[in-house]
Image (spheres, helix red, strand yellow):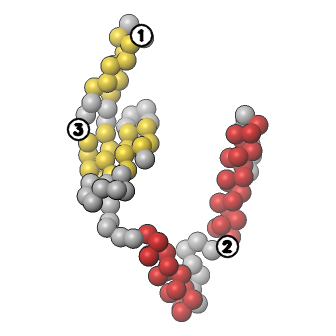
Amino acid sequence: MAVIGDKKMAVFDDQKENDKLVVYSHKIKWYRGKIPEAKKAEGQIISVPKVEPLRQECQHFLGCIKTRKKPKSDGQEALNVLRVLTACQKSLDAGKNIKI
């Protein structure tokens, strides 16, 4: 997955054993206002813990059941995420911003 902004680009490759997340500070120079030329920069490796997210999520859930603690993401959080996703879809369908 690549996320590209106007100042940097982040590339995440979960298939790699190491160096899964790399951030690049590439620059674009424009010649005659029309011709782009990429000035590639060295990537900065961002350390990502070697864990299994689904395993951690399941362990957290089981721990909450055992201790009766409130989970990090409960039903209310799920409802909030659903509201945001619904607004995003409505915005895409309408071609304009939608208030949540």
Q: Residues within 10 Å of mark 1 (few under 14, many from 20)?
A: few
59 relative to 77 in the view: left or right = left
Instruction: Give the residue at mark 1.
Output: 33
Q: Amino acid at mark 1?
A: Gly
The label number, if any, that marks residue 42 in the structure image: 3
- The picture places residue 10, in percent across and down from the top left corner, at 37, 44
Q: What residue lies at 32% left-to-right and 61% top-to-bottom?
A: 48
Q: Residue at x 57, y 78 (%)?
A: 71
Question: Circle 2 is placed at which residue position?
Answer: 75
Mark 2: which amino acid?
Answer: Gly
User: Which badge, 1 or 3, comes first in the chain's sequence?
Assistant: 1
N-terminal-most mark, 3 or 2: 3
Residue 90, percent from left and from top: 75, 44
Helix, strand or loop at disc 2? helix
Label 1 sits on a secondary structure element that is loop
Q: Amino acid at mark 3?
A: Glu
Residue 47, visible in the rendered structure:
no
Q: Which quadrant would residue 14 be assigned to in this image?
A: bottom left
Cα–Cα span, label 3 and label 2 = 43 Å
Instruction: Looking at the image, tell me whether mark 2 or mark 1 is earlier in sequence order.
Output: 1
Q: Are marks 3 and 2 in contact (CB under 8 Å)?
A: no
State how far apart marks 1 and 3 are (Cα).
26 Å
Name above or below for residue 69 compared with residue 16: below
